[in-house]
Amino acid sequence: LSGIYTGQSGVPITPFLSVDSSGTGELNDRPNLVGDPNSGPRRPNEWFNRAAFAQPDPGTFGNSGRNVIIGPDLHSVDLAVNKLTKVAERASLQFRAEVSMSSIARISAFQTSISTAPHSVQSVKLRMLLPEIHGSAKAVLASFNLV
């Protein structure tokens, strides 16, 4: 019997605006932080609190810091069972079973899109793919071998 557990805390994410609110000609301005961005419902399509961000006044920079959003934790468990049974003097039957269970969060196309209306957030999204029930992917392998 053997097993491995791996855990990783969430990846830090920095929100950016999709408009040039500072007037610098670049599209990497940050929004204003007006609440706790990590108090969201923690669902795949709504991982963080979108109401925690607001568009800064025209010609100014937002006050949101770097890495203010913490992404989902990742967990992985791998278990293996191996049993060798002698069936003859020079032959054995080997049973082997392996189970892998992982939580998967593929963060793709993280975007913030702040509308042009003052102090309103139109859309802030973190899209994740969480396969199967409760965000876990499972793989099972079982085999019998004559050794």
Image (cartoon, helix red, strand yellow):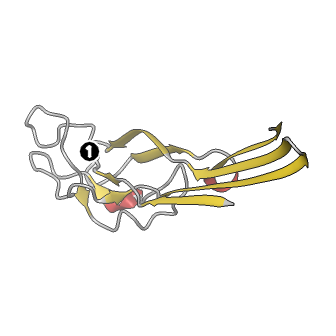
Of 122 and 125, which appears nearest the observer? Answer: 125
Would you call the spot at circle 1 few (<14 residues within 10 Å), some (14-19), or many (20 or more)? many
Q: Is residue 59 left or right of residue 86?
A: left
Q: Is residue 117 left or right of residue 27?
A: right
> Can you name the residue that lies furthest to the right here?
88
State which quadrant residue 12 falls in.
bottom left
Residue 100 location (% of width, % of height): 65, 50
> Can you name the residue that lies furthest to the top here?
25
- Up/down of 36 relative to 73, above or below: below
Residue 117 location (% of width, % of height): 29, 46
Name the image quarter holding the C terminus: top right
Q: Residue at the spot x=10%, y=50% of the render?
A: 60
- Up/down of 7 relative to 141, above or below: below
Label 1, secondary structure: give it.
loop
Residue 25 location (% of width, % of height): 11, 31
Of 100 and 10, which appears nearest the observer? Answer: 100
- Up/down of 45 relative to 64, above or below: above
Of 108 and 16, which appears nearest the observer? Answer: 108
- Up/down of 23 relative to 68, above or below: above
Of 33 and 99, which appears nearest the observer? Answer: 99
State which quadrant residue 27 falls in.
top left
The amino acid pointed to by label 1 is Phe
Residue 53 location (% of width, % of height): 31, 57
Q: Residue at the spot x=19%, y=52% of the render?
A: 56
User: What residue would you read off at disc 1?
Assistant: 16
Q: Residue at the spot x=69%, y=60% of the render?
A: 1
Question: Total of numbered circles in the picture?
Answer: 1
Q: Is residue 40 left or right of residue 15?
A: right
